Amino acid sequence: MMISTWVSVIVVLVVFTNGVRNEDDTQPCAKVHTSSSVVPLRSNVTATCVIREDCLLVVGQAVHIEWSLDNRFIPSSPVANESDRVSRVVISSFNYTRAVLTCSIQASHQVVAGVEIRAGYPPESPQNLSCQTNLTTPHTLTCRWDPGQQETYLPTKYTLHTEIRDSNKNYTYEPPPGVHSYIITRSDFSFFVEMKIYVKAENDLGENTSVPIILEPLSAAKLEQPNIVQVVTDTVGCLNLSWSLSQQQNWMRHNDLNLEVRLKTTGSSQRSNQIIVMKSVKGGDRVPSVPVTQCRLLHGTRYSAQIRVRYKESPWSKWSSSHSGVTLEQVPTGRLDTWMKVSGDTTSAQLNIQLFWKPSKQFHANSLNVSYTISVQTLHGTERKICSTSENYCTFKLPEKVKKVCLYAVNGAGKSNANEVRIYQSKVQTGIIDVTAVPNDDKSFLVQWKRVITSGLTGYVVEWLPLLKTGPSHIQFEKADKKQSSLIITGNFEPYKPFGISVYPRFKDGIGLPQTVNAYVRQKAPSEVPRMLIKKTWNSHIEITWGEIPLEQRNGIIQNYKVFYGVENGPVDVISANPEERKVILTNLKTASMYEAFMMVSTSGGSLNGSTIRFEVQPFDGVAIVIIVITCGVGLSLLIIVTVMICFSKPKSSRLQGRFWPVVPDPANSSIKRWASESTQYTHPSWDNEEPNPIYLSHLSFLDLTTKLSKEEDDLWLNSSENTSDLGESICGSPFIPGYTGSNSDSVPYATVIFSGPYSSPPPMESHVYLRSESTQPLLASEESFSPKCYQNMAANEMHIEQCFFGPNNENVPERGEDRISIWDDFPFLQALAINDTEND
């Protein structure tokens, strides 16, 4: 616009400068002729430039005219049968809203004439004409309209026209440019007389008129908000509302008014958001004094009431302030949905019961205050109350011999019909698998499960509760049909808080085992990352562990733990950990290198990084190994010493010592006769009158004799060679004697015990007789250097004879090679046996 204006000024200056100056007037040298200075946008424009013959700029010269549109050259053509002082130009599509067209002399580029051309659209018909009457002082009628969506690009004038019926009064109002409303004063209209109103739009390309409206100014008045005087109730299910208009508009009480009532329940958890909108009603001459009655309301329910009014089709007034009232109570009606959990031993006299309930869609409390009572009916038909509460659950012990449990809803008007609850026993049986719970939206979950084919299945119960809150009051439930495999549960689910969702199968005779999952309606990154601890280090490996994140800090289900580690300014490795184990082992670490590591914990809603720890893997050298080995050896030695001291230092350890180290007669310090008399009391000590340990009897061979040995036969070494056949066999079967044929080379009995009766029978009063002694120790000649020193033979002492057993005796060494007895020179004890055997012979 500024460029076009300056171009126009330049054109005018040029025209006046190049005009032929006379004494009386000044005329321009040239003139541009167009069909119109205002044209429709994108239409064709034709212009002609004519230079006067007496123009001083072209006197005596050949003239060639050129055209420019906003300083841009456009081609032209001379007019046929005209002189060179006339030129015509055609613009096929004028797409400027405003531009200057000029003609000039080509030789001097001198502009000699020009014209401004504007383009646009004709106006549209004004839309959405509406008028509203203001009943406050001063009374006015305000009309508004929309100019249309299309821009005209041209100055457009709007005028408002009114025609009052039954009179010759017509009025025209013109608002300022750009304003599309007008306020008519009270002197130009009447409240109860209809009038015709329309708007006309005009510009250089045409005009258009809006669709006229016919209205009664009072019907266009928006009344002030009314007042509710009081709300009373005298009929069951009904409320009576007394109301009035404002004082300034009280003069309209004789007119018919439309009234609308809005009721909203309060204090009722199951229907707290219900809004009841009533049809409009008409009043009469006494509208302010006649109450408005609304019926078919809930019983015993508090309602918040509001009203608004209008005259005929006028705009609704604002809603009045709220006023509340309570309908009369009635006995609760409808059914309660119940869910019972039974625990305890079915064989016991009483069972632990948790009973939950909630209103069904058909339940109506019919009161602001409702409580619940649980009664049991015994086999004798008597009913006894065991629980009364205003909560939605009750925990109690089921008395013995109960026939049924009844649940009642109670209010001031009485109690409801009994809701009988069947007592279901818990069953060790499952009817579902693969339970999942995913968010459906911010307030609900989609719970899905798979059915296991079982007989007697009647349905399912979906139970949920917040895991961060305790107590049965937070437990909620929903029932599902046996054909269902999914259910949408809705409740007050908080984001980033865990909820436990369980699905129970219901059978004809009990409740099966549940399947439980934890779920979040929305997840985000955890609030904290556990601290990593170095638990174990060996060679190039290191084990890192960490604790569990508190449930309230998880903000979602932990999907994985990732540990990032690496040397300083080096590549970073990552290892994932099992969320259940909470540990990782870093392998292939370089010794004597400083490592940095941090952990990232992730849920489906985000991840959080923990703090960085630094550690160094020390080289594991030989000195450390030696220290460890020495330490382990010292510890093991101390353990053995302590164990031995415990076993042998206390009197009570004698039994343990006897168990592991049996008391065995020493062959080197005894004789067969000694064994038969004195040594036996040491061989088999009595431990609290217990039977002899079989470990000792296993070193004895038993021989039962049918007859009792006489006193003369007491020493079988001297009197009988036949009864020593077993002894002879043992000696002759020795592996050190030629012709050895012994059956057992590993172990032979020390002695043969001869009983007068079977050895399994109760022991006789007299002492047992021992025939012989054999040793489990190998009697090798190569072990001569390790033989013990001489020991005194007890039997020899009685005869004042000193003998040497299991050891050399320089004074009693027989010469070799004399006879067969010389074979036993290296074995004194056996030599004594052989001598005695010879004497017996």
Image (cartoon, grey):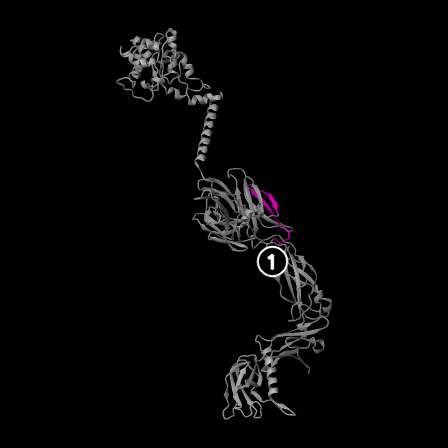
Decide if residue 704 is on the left or right side of residue 226.
Answer: left
The verdict on residue 382 being magenta is yes
Position in image of residue 403 (x %, y %): 54, 43
Q: Is residue 510 visible?
A: no
Q: Is residue 15 above or below residue 143?
A: below
Question: Toward the viewer: 442 or 675?
Answer: 675
SS for callout 1? loop
In the displayed structure, would residue 401 be above or below residue 815? below
The quadrant of the picture occupied by the C terminus is top left
| 330 w.r.t. 208: above or below | above
Residue 385 among those drawn in magenta: yes
Query: Where the N terminus falls, by quadrant?
Result: bottom right
Predominant SS along the magenta part: strand
Above or below, 592 relative to 283: above
User: What residue is shown with label 1?
Assistant: 273
Q: Identify the residue at image location x=45%, y=19%.
A: 687
Front in this rendered view, residue 616 or 828: 616
**Badge 1 amino acid:** Asn
Image quadrant where residue 375 sits: top right
Boundaries of the magenta span: 365-389
